[in-house]
Image: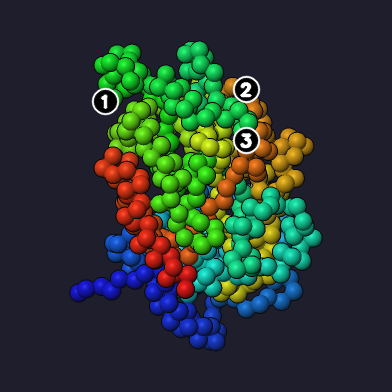
Amino acid sequence: MTQKKFSRRDFLRAGALTAAGAALAACCPQPATEKVIITQVVEQEGEQVVVTVETEKIVQATPGPGEVVEITFMGWGATEEDEGVRAAIRTFEGAEPNIKVTWLHTPDNYGEKLLAMLASGTPPDTAFDGSGGYQTDCRDGILLDITEQIKADPVIGAEGYFIEPQETERCTYKGRWYGIGSCWVAPHMYYNADIFEAEGIDPPSSDPAEAWDWDTFVEVCRQLTVDANGNHPGESGFDVNNVERWAVQWPTWSIPLHAAIQSNGGQWIDPATGLLAIDQPEATEALQAIADLMLVHQVMPQNTAFEALGMSNTQMLENGRMAMAVDGSWALAWISKIEATLGTAVLPKMKAPATDMQAHLHVAYKETKHPEEAWRWLRFLATEFYQLQFCKMGLWLPSQTALMTEEGISRWMTLRTAPGMGVHPEGYDKIVADYLPNYGKVLYMPPGYGEADAIITPALDAVWIGDKTAEQAMSEVVADANAILEEEAG
């Protein structure tokens, strides 16, 4: 039997029938909770995926005085984030004894499982919402509008509480707030300082005013890349298939690539139109520069070669197989634990210093039966306690201005003096207080981006292996991808 393919929008529309049935059932006496097993067929990147998830549907009337309200909170995250959320829940419930928060930790297949819950009419009350789908959710009308609550709040609604204009740029859709950013994260460089010392090369700086220009970066990368016979790229006999130490890894996905495009004066998404602009010269030049690190300069392993090594960038930094790695600021939580002497730096610049600013948002769903309690939980997540614990472990950068002052930084930053002693390398305060707010560029995807990305990503794959130039690849697909975005915006 042939199964009908569902787009995300079709899937949610079909789920409205299930939600209507649930509403009728709610007219009859119901238990406080009931188990719900959801099975749906979802189309993802052109393939049908059968998603089954067991969740708990809260069926509870508005509580009277002294009654406890249960709300759910769904999110992803590794061990550090899981433990941090649980600690936050304990603190929140201590301050709000009439609200119980149930943590639906979903580290795997988060998007598919959340979509299945939404389509079945059993969404969580609150959840993580990624930058790729947030505006789509706003457009689809499934999120709780919290604009008035934020405006009326004397703390998080106060002028200057968040880093602006970036917070408003990411949180608002058509002038209304539907979420609050969890934090900020940004890609920058990590490096093994022992390698630089041994080679007699000055390492890159955490000060954006001292960012390497691109030519300097490439030249240093040539000096740091060496094959098993001691040869460097460009020298006679250099064997790219037998490299002993690579200079760098620059990941080829949207966040690190967006940083490079911004540095070259380009855009991933044109903020004026909401359409892709990665076919414009400034963008394709930046994409090609990243590809050339692999294909021309031979200072970075190709993606397949990196995977074949069977090591993470953290492991390669630690064992000396790699000198520098571009990664998100979140990676400091585990890279800080390596045995080698660790340094951090701003990204090299093409035309000007730039990095990407992103993070997931905290949202409540419009269908929640407890909007006031959901709002109180979202508000708690936007206060200092929640950010401080993740900033201290190196997982997050703050989005609150008070935590970016000299005094604020001293409350969470610990200088890494040796492995296991402190988290943040010397100079990291420049990345936090200067690089992030002054050179960070927000990238949040317009409605329908997931379908457009299914066209863009395969085209970029051809660039990384050298089958096409970035200019050729993007000129072939951006118009089709933008047609999808234009349709989805309508």
* SS under mark 2: loop
Alpha carbon separation for disc pair 2 and 1: 36 Å
Question: Along the polypeptide, which appears first: circle 3 or circle 1?
Answer: 1
Q: Residue furthest front?
A: 281
* SS under mark 1: loop
* Display colour scheme: rainbow
Q: Position of residue 444 (x, y in %)?
A: 53, 56
Q: On the rendered image, what quadrant is the N terminus found in?
A: bottom left
| Nearer to the camera, 245 or 461 | 461
Q: Position of residue 76 (x, y in %)?
A: 49, 53
70 vs 292: above or below:
below
The answer to whether residue 128 shows anywhere in this view is no
* Kind of residue at disc 3: Ile
Residue 131 appears left or right of 310: right
Question: Along the polypeptide, which appears first: circle 2 or circle 3?
Answer: 2
Residue 470 appears left or right of 406: left
* Kind of residue at disc 1: Asn
326 vs 385: above or below:
above
Alpha carbon separation for disc pair 3 and 1: 35 Å
The picture quadrant where one finds residue 5 is bottom left
Residue 341 appears left or right of 462: right
Q: Which mark is residue 70?
A: none
Q: Residue furthest right?
A: 154
* Kind of residue at disc 2: Thr
Q: Which mark is residue 417?
A: 2
Residue sitting at 51 percent across and 67 percent down? 137
Where is mark 3, residue-wise?
431
Where is mark 1, residue-wise?
241
| Nearer to the camera, 164 or 210 | 210
Numbered circles on residues, count: 3
Of tags 2 and 3, the one toward the viewer is 3
